[in-house]
Amino acid sequence: MTRIDFHTNIPDKLSYACRLARKAYASRARVVLLAEDAVQAAALDAALWTLSETDFLPHVMVGDPLAAHTPIIITDRDDAELPHYDMLVNLTRATPAQLGRFQRVFEIISTDDSDAAAGRKRYVAYKQQSYPLTHFVAGQS
C-alpha cells in the first residue's frame, strides 16, 4: 500500500520539492514532481537546474522522449502517462488521480491557509482509506 508523508508548514514549496528530489536521486529512487500548473512546472524545471552548483539532477518534463530513462519527471497533468511510480511529490491542492500506483507520496503543504485547509482534507480522506500516514511539521523539533 502507498505510504503517504505529509510535510506541512513549508515556506517555499518549490525549494523543498527540489531538495526532496535531490535526496531521492541520491538514494537511486525515481520521482515524479506534480505541479499545480504549467507555470509552477516551469519554475520547478528552472529550480532544479539552479539548486546547487555541485549537484546535477537529471530531470525532464513528462512528455520528453527521454522521460523513461530519466529519474526525475515534472508534470502538471494529473492524468499523464508516467514512466515510473516510485515516488510522487504532490505540490497541488488535490488528491492525485494515480495516488495508489506510487510506492510513496509526499504531500507538500505550505504555510498558506487555503493550502493547509486542502491538505487537512486530504489527510482525513487518506486516513479514512487506511493509508499509512506520517506527518512532519517544518520548523518543529
Image (cartoon, rainbow, N blue to C red):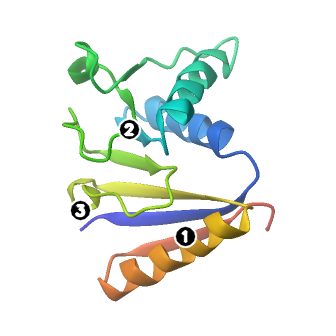
User: Residue beneath label 1, please?
Assistant: 119
Label at residue 31: 2
**Residue sitting at 38 percent across and 64 percent down?**
95
How many C-alpha atoms fall within 10 Å of the one at disc 1: few (<14), some, or many (≥20)?
A: many
Residue 102 appears left or right of 49: left
Q: Which amino acid type corresponds to the residue marked 1 in the rendered image?
A: Gly
Picture coordinates of residue 130, whole percent (x, y): 31, 83
Q: Nearer the viewer, residue 48 or 97?
A: 97
Q: Name the amino acid type tagged 2.
A: Val
Q: Position of residue 94 (x, y in %)?
A: 43, 62
- Residue placed under numbered mark 3 in the picture: 100
Residue 15, how many percent across, how many down?
A: 67, 37
Report the side of 24 relative to 13 (left or right). left
Closer to the eye: label 1 or 3? 1
Q: Position of residue 106 (x, y in %)?
A: 47, 56
Number of residues whose C-alpha sits closer than 10 Å to that of mark 3, classed few (under 14), some (14–19) or many (20 or more): some
Between circles 2 and 1, the one closer to the viewer is 1
Badge 2: few (under 14), some or many (20 or more) residues near its Cα, within 10 Å? many
Q: What is the spatial separation of the Cα atoms under label 1 and label 3, in whole angstroms?
A: 17 Å
Q: Where, by quadrant of the figure, is residue 51 drawn?
A: top right
- Decide if residue 22 is in sight here: no
Q: Is residue 91 left or right of residue 34?
A: right
Going from N to C along the chain, the mark reached first, 1 or 3, is: 3
- Name the residue rendered at 36%, 46% in the picture: 87
Q: Secondary structure at mark 1?
A: helix
